[in-house]
Amino acid sequence: MEWDREMACMRAKGRKEGLAEGAQQKAVEAATNLLRMKVLTPEQIAQAQGLPLDEVLALKEQLAAQPAQSATGR
């Protein structure tokens, strides 16, 4: 019985961590898309996505370092 409770607790913790990782990944993807659109400032993007400004600025540098893609995304 104790083992069952422990396993349920571990599964719940794993789900919680997975959801947090997924939310973080989604925020980074959204920030990357917003940076590509060049409509908002990095500060606005950081605030809107709940990300640290230094992370958004690092994403911006990564995008600048990538070769330009064609309009079709290829």
Image (cartoon, helix red, strand yellow):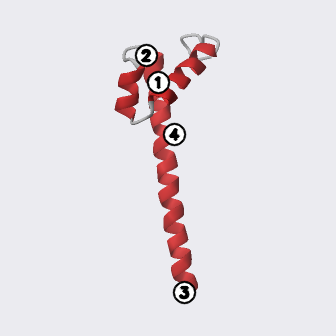
Three-letter amino acid code at disc 4? Answer: Gln
Q: Is residue 48 shown left or right of residue 9?
A: left
Q: Is residue 45 shown left or right of residue 67?
A: left
Report the residue marked by disc 4: 25
| Label 4: element kind | helix
Report the residue marked by disc 1: 33
Give the CA distance from mark 4 to mark 1.
12 Å
Give the CA distance from mark 4 to mark 3.
35 Å
Give the CA distance from mark 2 to mark 4.
19 Å
Give the CA distance from mark 2 to mark 3.
53 Å
Three-letter amino acid code at disc 2? Answer: Met
Question: Is mark 4 in CB contact (under 8 Å) with mark 3?
Answer: no
Looking at the image, is mark 4 or mark 3 earlier in the sequence?
Answer: 3
Give x and y (percent) for residue 45: 39, 25
Instruction: Answer above or below: position of 57 versus 39.
Output: below
Residue 2: numbered disc: 3
Q: Quadrant of the N terminus?
A: bottom right
